[in-house]
Image: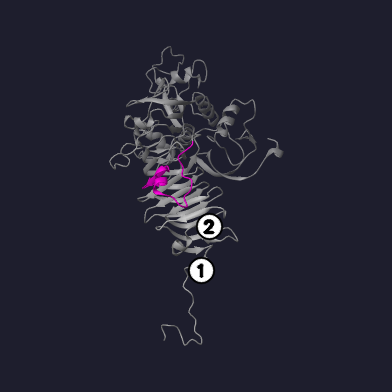
Amino acid sequence: MNNSKKVFISALAASLAGGSIVAVQPAQASENGAKVFSDVKPGDLYYDAVLSLSKSKIITGYSDGTYRPYEKLNRGQAAVLLTRALGLDKTQVKNPGFKDVKVGSTYYNEVAALAQFNIIEGYPDKTFKPEQPISRAQMAKIIAIGYKLQEEDLVDNPFKDVNAKDWYATYIPALIKNKITVGKTPTTFSPYDTVSRGQMALFIHRSEQMKRVIESKVMNITADSILLGDKTYKLNAEQKKWLNVSNLNALKGAVLKATVIGDELVAVQSIQLNANGKASENGAEYKNHVVLNGGGTALDTNIIINGDYVSLENLIIKGNLEITSNVKNSLYTNKLKVDGKITTKDSGVVSAAFDSLASTSDKQVEKAPTVIFNNSTIQALESAINGFHFKFAGSTSIRQITLSANAKIEGEKGISLESVTLASGALQVSIDAEVLLLQLQEAKGKLTLGNNAKVNNITIPKDSDIKAIIQNYEQVKNLITKIDGENNPDTSTPSTGGGSGGGTPEQK
């Protein structure tokens, strides 16, 4: 590799190295976002596979800038590679009970993830043997199961070293048909030969070519499958927790972007919910909502709410949650956790947003689209669409709210909003909640505080007048503890020094 192309930076990375993970390594020069290894050259057998998997961050390398493609790969390292390639969740895992892979050990999360999806089983003595080199027979099994390749009898067996009754034989036909491997020679598979790092990269790279990304509408769901457009795909146990018949009212017509292999749904990248519920009747506030109940599952997925009268319940969204202006009336969440950001987006349809919150009437509030977060955990909420009314209830916690549009914020007693920022575009805002830090980036907007509001500290633009910014300042000044980090001069107790007046009133 040309020294002039090298860029040395420190980066945390898991490196499949010699039975252990190298945590810190310098990054090599890159080619289209992939690391270039000094021992894997253009034209080499493994070059394209290594380059592709490096770009996808499925493989890394050693700290000296090498990949060492001819070095043996152990079972633990293979688990790491395959878990990354399949995009399995390593955080929500159950202990598989292997005696030699303890909780917190190097390969634990990856081995547990593969065991949870029945891709690996371990040995009869309840060990996994993570440091033992992986064989070609073992590779055949985990690749076939991991990539949903159908088992079948080994008919017209070309390999003299494979018996059709061998435990791994039924996994070989699919590997051959999909050109993942064709054997070491035309007549030998060499099932007990060890797999090198380069060979595993090649097998996974070829397997990855079978993946397809589709984007299609949900037409129907059964106990075991989902109909996307005119094609049916099988669901795994985790997917069935939320892609199920009980959620069909909310899911029907949704646009799903997903990765599939053959007739298996492998992963869901995003889902846009388009279904609409109905307004409440007889005081049953959310009875007629369409409900997506996640059953407590964690989705590494982006969710877009593009329908009205929708409820999200018992769900962890590890991606982002987007709310479009097609939510014209009501969105309700309960026991929702969003690790990414919650944002609002214009759907292109004019929403029923109210014009002014400075003198909001009850009629205007009813017209505003109301989003209620109940018993939910939120990292960040950013709203750029006029007219949303955000309510926080129950045990909800939220770290950061950023408004660049007109909005109303309401919080139940006992809920503290850590930080609220009013950015450019937030010209009419009403807050009726406890806020630890309220930041105003411009003095153009008009802010109204409700009677139940409480502001620990408010920061305002330099040389601006808080009385001009907060429309009802005289009525709510006692609710503001500090301004720009200093005690509010309009509510601070004046000093009572002595003097010729003969002492303070208490002393007279």
Task: Give the quadrant of the C terminus.
Answer: bottom left
Q: Are marks 2 and 1 in contact (CB under 8 Å)?
A: no
Classify residue 71 as left or right of residue 342.
right
Instruction: Report helix, strand or loop for mark 2.
Output: helix
Instruction: Report helix, strand or loop for mark 1.
Output: loop
Q: Could one spot residue 218 in this view of the protein?
A: yes
Task: Give the quadrant of the N terminus.
Answer: top right
Q: Is residue 198 above or below residue 317?
A: above
Which amino acid does the dot numbered 1 rest on?
Pro
Which amino acid does the dot numbered 2 rest on?
Ile
Per the rendered image, the range of residues in magenta is 350-376
Q: Nearer the viewer, residue 262 or 327?
A: 327
Q: Is residue 229 magenta?
A: no
Classify residue 9 as left or right of residue 413.
right
At x 49%, y 15%, the residue is 187
Q: Could one spot residue 99 in this view of the protein?
A: no
Residue 332 appears in which quarter of the rendering?
top left
Where residue 365 sits: x, y (%)? Answer: 41, 46
Residue 489, numbered circle = 1
Q: Nearer the viewer, residue 421 or 206?
A: 421
